[in-house]
Image (cartoon, coloured by chain):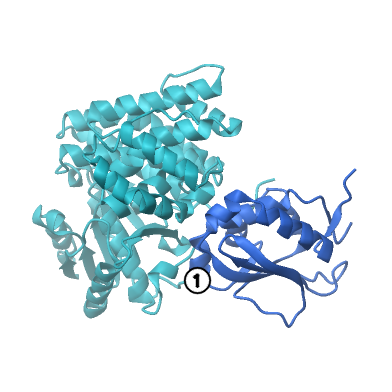
Chain colours: A cyan, B blue
Amino acid sequence: MKLVWWFSVPKIVFGDDALSELEIIQGERAIIITDKVVNGLGLADTVSNKLCERQWSTAIWDGAIPDPKVSTVKEAAEAMKQFGADWIIAIGGGSVIDTAKAAWVLYEKPDVQLDALTPFDILGLRAKAKLVCIPTTAGTGSEATKAIVIRDDETGRKFATINPELTPDLALLDPTFVVGLPKDFTAYTGMDALTHTIEGYISVWKNDFSDGCSLQAVKMIFNWLPKSVEDLSDLEAREKMLVAACLAGMSFGNSQAALAHSLGHSMGSVLRLHHGLSVGMALPYTIEFNCRDNEDCASQYAELAGIIGITGKDHVKVSMKLAEAVRDLMGKIGSPRSFAEAGVTRDIFDEGLERLVEFAMMDSSLTMNPRNTDSHEIRKMYEYMFEGKVIDF
Amino acid sequence: MTEKLVFPSDEWIEKYVDALNKNARYEDAAKTWEGDFVFQIDADGKTIPEDVRFYLDLWHGKCRSARMAGPEDTAEFVYAGPLSNWKLLFDGKIDPIKGIMARKFKLTGDMGKVMRYTKAALELVATTREIPTKYLDE
């Protein structure tokens, strides 16, 4: 018998007229949370105009930054308060959506300490506003999750947390909103989605609902990610990746991520590498590490491998081939497979290694990893990742 | 055959502390942890008429002291739940963090601090499996 658990997702509206959902939501004052790049593309105006046609008042706050800091979140919350928003509309990638979610918490509950926010807190969100997320990348999955990742201003440490109330009310998946994404970010965010879906499938908190999402997402990502990188204007590929990323979010959002995320979060904190690039780089090494010491986990990787046509009786060997397939995909789309490929020099790596290990050990995603690990193994994994060596321990 | 020790009891705690202080993975995960815990088995009105509690002082990857505790004992953290859920925890059916989320246990104290040491929490539980244990209702 399984322990009581929940599967929570927002209402998801997808397809090329997804924005039409804005014609039926009830409210008066919407604040759009975004960044300067997205705002510059006119996407915030598109949404704002749609709402203004219905006599809504709107405001645009475009101060979101990559890997949002607590101070940035506070600025967004202040903008929400000044405007008196009854809807918050996040338009952007994971950093924008996480900024909006975290600022939403402070808007509703100004006394909350973000770095102390836990899955167990009862926040009472939605007394002031509801949340709509419109992703402009196909990777974060944040539009479908109760997770946020924020960076501490002083230490630079990224902390990830979940809270059931943070699941958005509505996610609008409009492929035209991801068309402007450049090649490298299409690749990195796609790897983020792949990491979510694979980690969601092997997390010790996995469940049948999250499994279903992962299986479909893996199939779609291996099929459509290379196409969406190869032809940035391929709307079908963009739409499929947008759906796959959301499915991946639905998976790991309800089963949680694991070791690749702990390694990746730390890489973002210490070396300021892109989130998708980081967790994606850590993914094949994590597969190789986990499958060696845990037959259940190896059989789960083997199930995922079967989706992309890799089969065999020896689950460890199949898992290793899955890791190889992930590396091949990364090579094809131009996502770095090692620190060296990502342009991290030996000096910079050595200088940051202790903090990389320290932050990874403090990352809560480690809790859900199927193989037990320690700081020595994590240090060794980073060493292997620097050189691009296959994990053999 | 190894004699099973009653959880919790002075004998069980002594064995547990000994095992915990030899657990290199716990020491590694908790090397910067500073904080004490009261663990509580909730009264059920039947075999456990009153809350049963024990205390661990955890400091930089080691347990500095431990003992059975009374209702007046306080600590930075209190982790509490019914005996049936402690059994699930020790059997590995639930982990200490998921146990709180699923409302099988209550944690009093700075939860944010605990969330930075979830790996150490897993090792605290894993160490219990080294102790031949029988429960208060057996």
Horizontal side of residue B54 vs A139, given as left or right? right
| Residue A355 x, y percent position in the rendering | 37, 54
Horizontal side of residue A29 vs A364, given as left or right? left
A295 or B130: nearer the viewer: B130
Q: Quadrant of the N terminus of chain A?
A: top right
> Could you tell me the amino acid type at mark 1?
Ile
Q: In which quarter of the image is residue B106?
A: bottom right
* Residue to which mark 1 is pinned: A122
- Identified at 62% across, 71% down, the residue is B36
Please say if B122 is above or below A32: above
Q: In which quarter of the image is residue A346?
A: top left
A277 or A230: nearer the viewer: A277
| Residue A165 x, y percent position in the rendering | 45, 64
| Chain of the residue under the numbered disc 1 shown in the image | A
| Residue B123 x, y percent position in the rendering | 62, 52
| Residue A373 x, y percent position in the rendering | 53, 44
Horizontal side of residue A71 vs A141, given as left or right? left
